[in-house]
Image (cartoon, coloured by chain):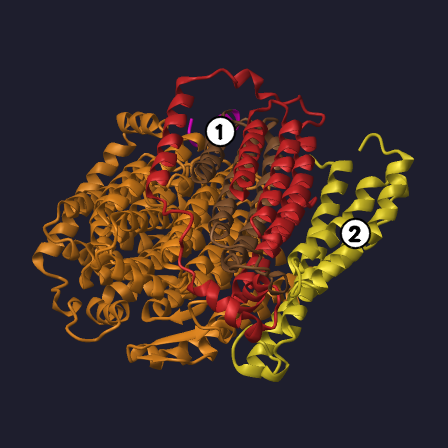
Chain colours: A red, B yellow, C orange, D brown
Amino acid sequence: MTEIVLTTLLWTVLITGALSLAFRDLFVSVILLSIFSFLSALLFYVSHAPDVAITEAAVGAGMTTLIFVWAVQSCAGPLPELEDRKYRHFKFEDLLDLLLVLLIGISLFLFLPPLTGGPVSLRDYLLLKGYQETGAVNLVSAVYLGYRAFDTFGETIVLLCGVTGSIYFLSRTY
Amino acid sequence: MRTKTDMLDVASRKLAPYVLLFGCYLISYGHLSPGGGFQGGVILASGLILPALGCRKERREDLLSNYALSIGETVGFIFLFLLGIVGIAATGTFLADPFPATVRPHAWFIFFLNLAIGLKVGAGIGLLGLLLIRESEEPSYD
Amino acid sequence: MNTTIDLPVILLLFSPLAAAIISICGKFIPSRYTEWPGFIVWIAGSITALAAAFPVIASGATLQYSLGGWAEPLGISLEITGLTWIATLTDIIIASSAWLCTRRSGQSTPLFYFFFFMALFSLQGVLCTRDIFNLFVWFEVLSLSSFVLISYDRSLISRIAAFRYLLISSMSILLFLIGVWILYQLFGELGLVQIGIKARALRTGGSPPSYSRAAGAAAGLITAGILTRAAIIPFHTWLPDAHSAAPYQVSALLSGFVIKAPMLALWRIFDAFSFPELLDLLIWIGGICALWGVLAAMVQRDAKKLLGYHSVSQMGYIIAAFGAGSRLGRTAALFYIIAHALFKSLLFLSVGRVTVGVGSRDVYAIRGGARRFPADTFFFIIAAASISGIPFFAGFTGKILVTESLYGHPVSYMLLAAGVGTAASFFKLARIFTGKPSPEEPSPGEHGSVQEEDTKVSVSAFIGMSIVAAGCIILGAFPGIVDRGIESLATGSTRMLKASFIDWYSLSHLKKASFSIGSGFLLSFLLVSGPGRSLSHIVRGLKTGLNGSLRLILLGFLVLIIFTALSY
Amino acid sequence: MIRILVIGLFCLGLWGILISRSLLRKIIGLSILNSSVVVLFILAGRLDGKSAPILSAVREGSIVDPLPQALMLTAIVVSLSVTAVGLILAVKIYRSCGSLDIKEIEESPDEYDH
């Protein structure tokens, strides 16, 4: 049952992503990308990852879309309108690109380990001891802010650099 | 930003406090339920951005000035850093839980970390969003 | 033989962060109160930490530190090994000289220092971490601060270069993440040590072939992801643009150390994986990289792009020596990492100061640099002598070590040919210092940002460049002593040092050096002659655009995955 | 089937980065690529467990592995930062060049190559 739900959701995610790349109007692409993020948030929710789902919804469907909309709006301003329609005829080069990407996909398909049956020792340890050691009922929080808080610290620094850099790029002196 | 009706204007103003409240909820219950500092922070930021996005330009009054937000981000980050240093003082390692093990099943440390991250992320991303909106209103060209 | 001492690790890691925080406060208070304090906090903290760590490192042990008290496999551990120690020392020397050259230049703003120290902080993270996902996080901090630093001076070219770097590095780091996922799915571990134990068990035990194929593919993806950061062929295409478009102080840091840190991370990953087949491939990649990099460098017209292609070429030497896998090879790789870091940053600083002062980067147009920039010329000569492998300079020793470690391997001849090209292109570059300032040269001030002070070397810049130049000379003048130290740090043991058996100034070594310098000198005449210049123009036209480089990188990934998956 | 779809999503992202000539569309491709990696991490944990890794909500059977979820939170934030910086750079390039097309941008005069 859940298998069917997952597969259906994945298909819709895939199709939305493809559409978002295929549409000529950049604005439509961005809105489709936002739907793509929202659908993947749904996928994560169904996959029992509510934390990731909330993050993806807030970041992907919210903030990223805001920045994308701003970018598209800025690029369609007083300057002559951009349209990559004129480059849209299919060329031999594109076929080679497709071949390259397909080959990477096939090699990943052949070499990737199965999605099920990974080692469970860490999971079982967390289920057993996670609450006692960190006090977090939400085990994702226990890992995110307890055991691997240093990753989170690094992540806030990534965000700090990203935000500071963006603000610098946006400032009048830049 | 061309057609901002009264409806949109009013709705965005009335909705913003609830969004902010939800952000605070996510931050403060991050250790119990899905959510946490980062997610709550982004929601807080959207609560800050929402009035700016929906309001008419002449009626716009930002909840917090850009200066306050950049101070907020710095303070949030330094708060996070100090929380790590407290760990060094208490147990000798960076980012260690400084509360004694007898208090352990209560996740005070994670709560404080969530608070610091929420403040930092909310202020930082809110600032970025507000700057983007301002920039789209009066773009700068080289 | 592991000791747990907390303070040096934490001090080493967080002093750049503290400096960054102090620097950014310069936005709120006058920046003269934050400029020097930030620098002093950073350098004092780092030097104290290194000094405190030295007794442990010298005894062959390592310092370990589990963050938050959570040990692996769940937690994250940091580690200072001999390798990290010496690399950090190099990093400090280069970064402090780049910082000293930044003062009083157009880049001297709080925000610039903030990103500068953030880059140093993430470099420290990359060097110290023992967790593969944590490595990803530090790589991202490093790349984000690099994007801002590269495009700091607002020119269009630098923005395009930063965008290319962003796209290429983000794409390759996502492929790296798939490798991390495979490792987690197979082994359930993220710590490098634990991964190493399980990988060895996988290789020796009779596990199903699908498992070893998956582990091999993971090794391939991770290696390729890191090689992109280290700018090895075919993943190098972002480097010449990014390093030539950045402000010259940033180029010194980027070329000097930012491309070396991934190499050192790769070193630790290979220690975990023990994958000799891939090492053999790396030797060949290194040879091709050295040769192609130098070919592309010889034909450049832009002085900084020339230096950028040389970084690609010299990374080839490093990776070839690393691929040799022997103890001598590792010593050679580490020595070359340090030597190249020193002389390349010195080259970027001296040439960068000249190009900014003159307002042009055209090798064929600038003349008479020696009259207007005597100090820079002096430092350039030291650095160019080092990179071309003139005896008694750092590059000579490094090249001997590399060729000795690859003795008899066909790649060593490729490296010899690359040495000829290196000498040739530096004779070509040296022409910007000779002669008289020509009348057609753009006058100072034409490009707006050029001031009269730029031609005079400030005291702090002079001190900064002297430190690096002294490093180059020490590495070259006392090869025996230095190499023994480096070998014991690289291999973590003091017994049976190979480097002490090398006869540094034997006839064959001197012959090789004089051959490469002599033929390089002749070749340089060919390069600047009429036919040479038009040939150069044609070769320059072969540059790959963004789409071309993305294709090249994906092709590299594909080949590497298939190779590693089938040979593991 | 799920495996093919996840890899398909990954290839879609790569394909998007490769063929599109507009800088913004390349970043859309990068977002898709990033999402596909997140989906890979999350789905792999999903197929073995029966409920979310929140102790108060565990009903029956085993939980899904919380560790990849924590890792992916970090990956999503990193992708947000990279996307923001990339988009702003793209807009700045557009304002200097008047074009978002990578071919046109790279053909813009480079004083040392011609």
Above/below status of C232 relative to C25: above
Q: Nearer the viewer, mark 2 or mark 1?
A: 2
Quick check: is C106 in the magenta stretch?
no
Q: Is residue D111 found inside the magenta-colored segment of the image? A: yes
User: Relative to residue C406, is residue C358 depicted above or below?
Assistant: above
Q: Which residues are the magenta region?
A: D104-114
Q: Nearer the viewer, residue B142 or C505?
A: B142
Q: Main secondary structure of the magenta part?
A: loop
Where does residue C288 sit, x and y in percent of width and height? 24, 41
Residue type at mark 1 is: Glu
Q: Is residue A132 left or right of residue C323?
A: right
What type is the residue that disc 2 sits on?
Val
- Residue C308: x percent and y percent? 38, 44
Q: Residues within 10 Å of mark 1 (few under 14, many from 20)?
A: some
For the question of whether residue C109 can be seen, the reply is no
Q: Can residue C506 be seen here?
A: yes
Assign a secondary structure to mark 2.
helix
The foreground one among B129 and C260 is B129
Residue C284 vs residue C146, the one in the foreground = C284
Label 1, on which residue?
A: D106
Give the chain of mark 2: B
In the rendered image, which quarter contains the C terminus of chain A? top right
Element under disc 1: helix
Chain containing the residue with disc 1: D
Please say if D83 is above or below A160: above
Picture residue at 39% right of the left edge, 49% below the top: C179
- Provide the residue designation for mark 2: B19
Point out the image quarter for the N terminus of chain A: top right
